[in-house]
Image (cartoon, rainbow, N blue to C red):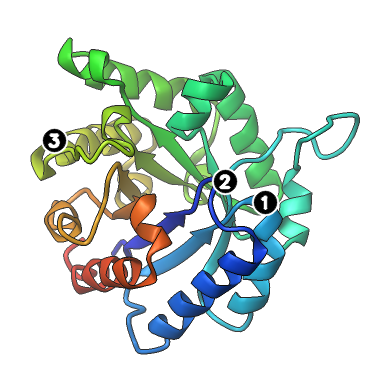
Amino acid sequence: MRRPLVAGNWKLHCGPQAAAKLALDIRNGLLGGREAASVVLCPPFVSLAAVREILQGTAIGLGAQNLFWENSGAWTGEVSGPMLRDAGCTHVIVGHSERRQHFGETDASVSKRVRAALDAALCPIVCVGENLAERESGRTEAVVAAQMRNGLEGFDAAAWTQLVLAYEPVWAIGTGRTATPAQAQEVHALLRSLVRARLGDAVADSLRILYGGSVKRENVAMLLAEPDVDGALVGGASLDAKDFLTIVELAGRGSGAH
């Protein structure tokens, strides 16, 4: 049984004061009993401490939006896995399409970041997804399969049980366009089948695969009704506590389906 996971990626929003207020509103809303789904909040680095204080004593996870693959050294501007762990993080997003598109992230660097996350006892949320040109040229399956294969090459079954995949079609992020439930299911099923072929049924059946890309309260129930969609990586809608809580609640209602 795969418990749904809803992760809020706050991106470049919310300094410490605003982040604490948003986290408090989400925390208080979840105390009302909407915890059938796992929840992770991913604020900017500068707001991790403020959000950690709000989340203490709850089951809500704290995630970072990126990490570097070295633990320490002359790497100005970078943040390491052990630093994130010390800051209270339980999760970290790796390979988000915005990192790939704007900051030169590659499958090879994703692989190193995933390894660093696992070594620091962090759960990496590893993102894959195609752009619009790749989707329209019929290359979706080849692109996401290559990203997963190259980004996660060499990881054994034990590592796979400690990570989460997220399918984020680049053409749907921040555009208001969303993959249809059938489109999402097709890619999620492909990813799970690739894991099954390589590592067997137990790992494939336990792996949580999230959908991300303009997820909102109006479409999340249909997406999560698909058998291989195990939750959501939520961007803009995670910045509104009411919207995010509704998404969590809807995800939890489907918790027995997978």
The secondary structure type at the circle numbered 2 is loop
Q: Earlier in the sequence, mark 3 or mark 1?
A: 1
Residue 64, disc: none
Q: Nearer the viewer, residue 92 or 97?
A: 97
Is 217 drawn above or below residue 77 in the view shown? Answer: below
Q: Is residue 155 left or right of residue 185?
A: right
Kindly identify the residue that appears in the image at 30 percent across and 41 percent down: 213
Q: Is residue 158 visible?
A: yes
Q: Are marks 2 and 1 in contact (CB under 8 Å)?
A: yes
Q: Nearer the viewer, residue 46 or 229?
A: 46
| Amino acid carrying mark 3 in the image | Gln
Q: Quadrant of residue 91?
A: bottom right
Provide residue 120's location: percent of width, then percent of height. Answer: 71, 49
Q: Earlier in the sequence, mark 2 or mark 1?
A: 1
**The C terminus lies in which quarter of the figure?**
bottom left
Which residue is disc 3 drawn over?
183
Q: Quadrant of residue 147?
A: top left
Q: Are there few (<14), some (14-19), or many (20+) residues within 10 Å of tag 3? A: few
Q: Nearer the viewer, residue 116 or 96?
A: 96
Residue 65, disc: 2
Q: Alpha carbon of mark 2 to alpha carbon of mark 1: how far?
A: 8 Å
| Amino acid carrying mark 2 in the image | Gln
Q: Is residue 88 visible?
A: no
Kindly identify the residue that appears in the image at 56 percent across and 28 percent down: 110
Q: Earlier in the sequence, mark 2 or mark 3?
A: 2
**The N terminus lies in which quarter of the figure?**
bottom left
Residue 45, disc: 1
